[in-house]
């Protein structure tokens, strides 16, 4: 390919791992005929917000551009920040790849990941996502991740097995990356939006150096953020559940009242208690129905904020 290949990574006190990643990415590009003609540029987003003294040395590398946000954003929003800051230098036809800096997104998978985008027309806005086929984690983490995926599937109707390893053209940065869902969660927004996407099987690699700073609290926050771009789907599913609960409660209460008024049969105490409980739940369901409907309509409108005057 001709043009520029932009490789964008968030770095949070992880310069040693990034240096190894950079060398292996350069090797991967140089050994692939389809990519060897490209000019390689790295964008490092310093998610330490200037607190990591080792970042400064990266600026001496001729192919590295360091972008420093004013405060810690987390790896998801750091990617979006770096891409938007570099967007003026990225041409529509350029190839952009985002990946973590620790080596778990493997450089040896780069050629396969970008192939669907390279083979597409720039106007198609093709997106290629790394599908995690294998993870080298502890048994406890795998179990927790399996439960999260099950919950994610129930709430959204979508299976999540992708991360930050994504490839697309520069035009995607100038247009689609403006969507506000990307401000919430970079990785899951690719699944939430109606995009021309291809999934490429890529096993997750191992960390090159240092220790992961992802603790349980940050992992939980990340999981919640992954759900937020699916707020409209979650709202619709919840609305259906609340409507069903309301109907069930209403039917139970009507049945109790009808039997009381038209029959001499004695109604068990547990049936009355159950009916009252279902009636209360029905009222709560109506209240939640109204709240979720308001949230749903707001989530559909927020994507237009800032763009309503775009056509002049």
Image (spheres, helix red, strand yellow):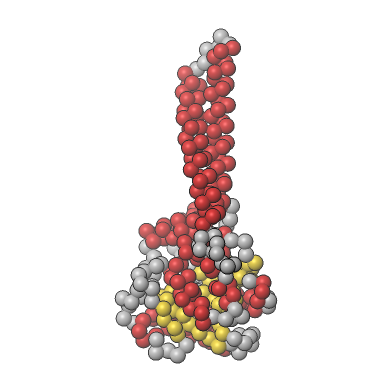
Question: Considering only vertical position in the picture, is 280 above or below 75?
Answer: above
Observer-nearest residue: 185 or 264?
Answer: 185
Q: Horizontal and vertical percent for residue 178?
A: 53, 67
Q: Residue 144: x, y in percent?
A: 46, 56
Q: Quadrant of the N terminus?
A: bottom right
Instruction: Compare residues 269 and 135 and report the one nearer the observer.
Output: 269
Q: Nearer the viewer, residue 307 or 215?
A: 307
Inspect this view and state whether residue 32 appears: no
* In-image side of 60 versus 31 (left or right): left
Q: Residue 251's quadrant in the figure?
A: top right
Q: Is residue 190 above or below residue 2?
A: above
- Quarter of the image for residue 77 reads bottom left
User: In the image, residue 53 lies at what x, y percent?
Assistant: 31, 81
Residue drawn at (56%, 85%), measured in percent from left and top?
A: 4
Tag count:
0
Please determine whether, in this image, residue 148 is positioned above or below residue 246: below
Q: Is residue 76 above or below residue 24?
A: above
Q: Residue at x 41, y 57 (%)?
A: 220
Q: Name the one closer to the observer, 16 or 172.
A: 172
Residue 78 visible: yes
For the C terminus, the quadrant is bottom right
Please give the name of the residue rendered at 49% of the width and 59% of the height, measured from the top-left corner. Answer: 226
Image spot of residue 33 (x, y percent): 64, 87
Say which residue appears at 58% left-offset and 11% top-offset. 263
């Amino acid at each position: 390919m001709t043009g520029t290949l932009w490789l964008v990574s968030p770095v949070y006190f992880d310069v040693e791992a990034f240096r190894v990643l950079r060398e292996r990415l350069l090797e991967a590009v140089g050994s692939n005929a389809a990519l060897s003609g490209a000019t390689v540029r790295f964008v490092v987003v310093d998610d330490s917000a200037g607190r990591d003294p080792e970042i400064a040395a990266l600026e001496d590398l001729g192919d590295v551009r360091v972008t420093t946000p004013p405060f810690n954003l987390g790896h998801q929003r750091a990617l979006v920040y770096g891409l938007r800051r570099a967007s003026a230098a990225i041409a529509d036809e350029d190839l952009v790849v985002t990946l973590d800096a620790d080596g778990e997104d493997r450089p040896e998978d780069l050629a396969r990941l970008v192939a669907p985008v390279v083979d597409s027309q720039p106007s198609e806005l093709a997106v290629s996502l790394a599908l995690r086929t294998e993870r080298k984690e502890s048994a406890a983490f795998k179990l927790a991740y399996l439960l999260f995926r099950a919950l994610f599937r129930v709430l959204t109707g979508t299976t999540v097995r992708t991360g930050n390893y994504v490839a697309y053209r520069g035009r995607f940065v100038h247009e689609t990356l403006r969507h506000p869902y990307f401000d919430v969660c970079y990785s899951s927004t690719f699944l939430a939006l109606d995009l021309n996407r291809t999934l490429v099987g890529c096993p997750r690699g191992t960390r090159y150096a240092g220790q992961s700073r992802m603790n349980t609290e940050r992992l939980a926050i990340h999981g919640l953020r992954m759900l937020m771009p699916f707020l409209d789907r979650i709202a619709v599913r919840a609305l259906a559940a609340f409507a069903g609960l309301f109907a069930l409660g209403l039917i139970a209460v009507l049945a109790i009242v009808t039997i009381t008024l038209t029959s001499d049969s004695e109604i068990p105490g547990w049936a009355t208690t159950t009916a009252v409980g279902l009636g209360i739940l029905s009222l709560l369901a109506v209240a939640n129905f109204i709240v979720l409907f308001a949230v749903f309509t707001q989530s559909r409108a927020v994507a237009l904020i800032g763009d309503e005057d775009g056509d002049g």
